[in-house]
Image (tube, grey):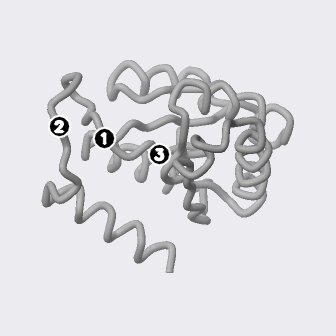
């Protein structure tokens, strides 16, 4: 089910059905906001780069600082140096990302990190005014992030 959702969203991006307005070069104004945990290697890296090629906003959480900074520089990806085995570190970086983006449309990570992301966003939503709560959505896609 999650893979089918991802494929449909990518097809909508490719076909231009999302009704995107002109904005900053390289990023669509109404672009999907994608978080990839462990995005510096393996399948997760491929997904991050694929979404970025579709001009989505992409953030990666990973421990590999050298590769993360290189991806940020070369592809315009937002990199957060994060200990992906530490729930507190993931939650702290996610809160930072949510302050910048106000929402995440797609999160890609393993089962444990997706659980942390869901819990953090639920807590974060509780602190928002009622009008803002309905605008936040997240789709968790479990992926193998290690190659």
Disc 1 versus disc 2: distance between alpha carbons?
7 Å
Q: Is residue 147 above or below residue 98?
A: below
Judging by the rendered image, the residue that carries numbered circle 3 is: 34
Judging by the rendered image, the residue that carries numbered circle 2 is: 21
Which x, y percent locates residue 42? 51, 52
Q: In the rendered structure, are the residues bearing label 3 and label 2 in contact, judged by CB atoms less than 8 Å apart?
A: no
Label 3 crowd bin: few (<14), some (14–19), many (20+), radius 10 Å: many
In the image, taking residue 99 as reference, residue 53 lies left or right, namely: left
Q: Is residue 69 above or below residue 10?
A: above
Which x, y percent locates residue 70? 44, 22
Closer to the camera in the image, 125 or 107:
125
The residue lying at 23 percent from left, 65 percent from top is 11
Q: In the rendered structure, are the residues bearing label 1 and label 2 in contact, judged by CB atoms less than 8 Å apart?
A: yes
Closer to the camera: disc 3 or disc 2?
A: 2
In the image, taking residue 139 as reference, residue 110 lies left or right, namely: right
Mark sitting earlier along the chain (1/2): 2
Label drawn at residue 30 = 1
The quarter of the picture where residue 58 lies is top left
């Amino acid at each position: 089910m999650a893979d089918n959702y991802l494929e449909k969203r990518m097809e909508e991006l490719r076909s231009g059905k999302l009704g995107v307005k002109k904005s900053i070069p390289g990023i669509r104004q109404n672009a999907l906001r994608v978080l990839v945990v462990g995005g510096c290697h393996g399948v997760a890296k491929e997904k991050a780069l694929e979404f970025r090629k579709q001009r989505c906003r992409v953030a990666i959480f990973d421990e590999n600082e050298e590769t993360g900074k290189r991806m940020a520089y070369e592809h315009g990806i937002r990199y957060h140096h994060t200990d992906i085995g530490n729930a507190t570190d993931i939650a702290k970086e996610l809160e930072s990302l949510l302050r910048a983006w106000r929402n995440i449309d797609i999160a890609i990570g393993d089962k444990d990190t997706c659980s942390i992301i869901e819990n953090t966003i639920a807590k974060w939503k509780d602190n928002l005014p009622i009008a803002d709560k309905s605008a936040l959505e997240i789709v968790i896609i479990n992926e193998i992030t290690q190659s």
